Image (cartoon, rainbow, N blue to C red):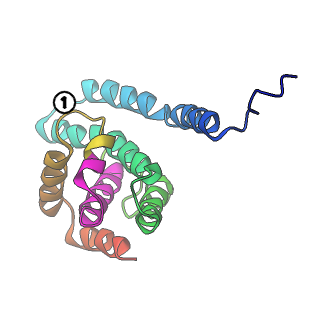
Amino acid sequence: MDNNKKPYNDEHIYAEEQDKIDAKKLQFYEDLRQKAKEWTKEKTGTTGIKLAEYLFLLPDFFILVCRIAVDKRVPAHIKLKLAGIIAYVMMPLDLIPDFIPIIGSIDDLVLIVLGLNMLLNDIDQQVLEDNWSGEGEVLHWMQRISAEAEDFLDRNILQRIKNFLKI
């Protein structure tokens, strides 16, 4: 063995390997995105198409929260809040059960968007934009979804989502 070679646990090499592992873990996002595209092609009707448009953003926003949660520029106390949002989205029990087609995922999307809106005071907007891989501008979608949530969701459900975010 050559004594001049650095061992595998060199920090730089380890960080590169960890990034590759993280990228593979988040590959499910691309699969989910493809399923959402196929689903929206099957739906008709104005309300269904509008909801599908927002539902299609759920994977974009979920991956955004995951990426921000591992971003080195984000403070630990913010990462804890993001972990709570991620846990809510992944929980089988929601305010609106996930087994209800379309509507069941809307509370997840609204929770993510409202949570990100709250965190914008504590993180740089650039962090949000750097981690966004969806179509269009992330802030535009956040404003649009927040406004629509006020009109679309039952006031009690919206208030319960807001209460969850204050935990």
Front in this rendered view, residue 140 or 41: 140
| Residue 117 on the magenta segment | yes
The residue lying at 76 percent from left, 33 percent from top is 7
Majority secondary structure of the magenta segment?
helix
Q: Is residue 166 something one can see in this rendering?
A: yes
Q: Which residue is rendered at x = 21% and y = 44% of the image?
A: 138
Quarter assignment of residue 17? top right
- The local secondary structure at tag 1 comes to loop
Q: Which residues are magenta?
A: 103-128
Q: Which residue is mark 1?
A: 44
Q: How many marks?
A: 1
Q: With respect to residue 116, does 31 lie above or below? A: above
- Choose between 114 and 91: the one closer to the eye: 114
Q: Tell me, yes or no, if residue 99 can be seen here.
A: no
Displayed quadrant of residue 164 = bottom left
Residue beneath the point at 38% across and 46% down: 62
Residue 122: percent from left, percent from top? 29, 66
Name the residue at the right extreme. Answer: 1
> Residue 105 in magenta?
yes
Closer to the camera, 69 or 97? 69
Q: Amino acid at mark 1?
A: Thr
Instruction: Give the quarter of the figure containing the C terminus.
Output: bottom left
